[in-house]
Amino acid sequence: MMLHDYFIKSWVPGVLLWAALYCTSHLLAAANGRLYRGGAREVFEWEGSPARDDADPNAAARHNWYKVYSAITLVGISILLAVVWIYSHELVFWEAFYFAVLGSCTLPLCTTSLRYLNNYFIFRAVRGGRFIVGKIHFSEIFVRKASAMGLLAFAGVYLLIALVLGDWFCLGGTLGCLLAALRERERGQDLEQKSRPKDGDTARSSPAA
């Protein structure tokens, strides 16, 4: 039996795949956070990073809310995948539709996990103090825009695979990465607009003629 057949026969493999990738991405993020606080931020400083909020009294509340949000997302998407598998059987093209939905949920997580894994090895190298020296500061605007470009690049790769192989799973991953890239781009634009001085502030700060 091919692996494809397991996802067709039951909704369980799809849910397990999603849950495994989601948990993996969070474990990698937690490992990166420990390395970042353990010395990597002496070389790489990410503006807006949760790991920089150690002294913020509201950081604990935000962290607790993030855990609740993550649990809701894990359960909610799992239920969504199960519902799509169960109720899409009435469609003629239900297999293609289900795989497109599954790909839109899981492939963006693969992309995120690869980025986390890359940061993990970089942070490990920083702690040694031999391979990376100096210090660099990333603004949150740059981080958001770079994240959007990375997601767009992966969307292009998934689209190419989908077109060559006629794969609905990769086509769904293309859509998922595009939506994630748009969200990151919008966040970057919002931060950029907030960072620009208002006309009144510019007038007050300019010297009198």
Image: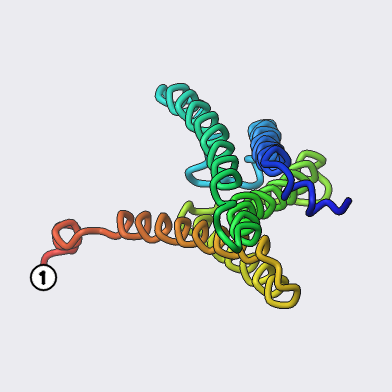
User: In the rendering, at what x and y percent does residue 156 appear?
Assistant: 63, 72
**Numbered label tally:** 1
Identity of the residue drawn at 60% across and 63% down? 93
- For the residue pair 71 and 27, the one nearer the viewer reads as 71
Snapshot quadrant of residue 155: bottom right
Say if residue 29 shows up in the picture: no
Seen in the picture, residue 62 relative to 9 is either above or below; the reply is: above
User: In the rendering, at what x and y percent does residue 67 appear?
Assistant: 52, 27
Identity of the residue drawn at 71% across and 42% down? 10
Seen in the picture, residue 34 relative to 86 is either above or below; the reply is: above
Q: Answer with left or right where residue 196 lies relative to residue 40.
A: left
Q: Answer with left or right where residue 158 lies relative to residue 177.
A: right
- For the residue pair 205 and 72, the one nearer the viewer reads as 72
Snapshot quadrant of residue 195: bottom left
In the rendered structure, which amino acid carries the disc numbered 1?
A: Ala
Identity of the residue drawn at 40% across and 25% down? 58
Identity of the residue drawn at 67% across and 41% down? 11
Q: Answer with left or right where residue 93 lies relative to residue 1.
A: left
User: In the rendering, at what x and y percent does residue 173 appear?
Assistant: 62, 60
**Mark 1, residue position:** 209
Disc 1: CA contacts within 10 A as few (<14), some (14-19) or many (>=20): few
Residue lying furthest bottom: 164
Q: Secondary structure at mark 1?
A: loop
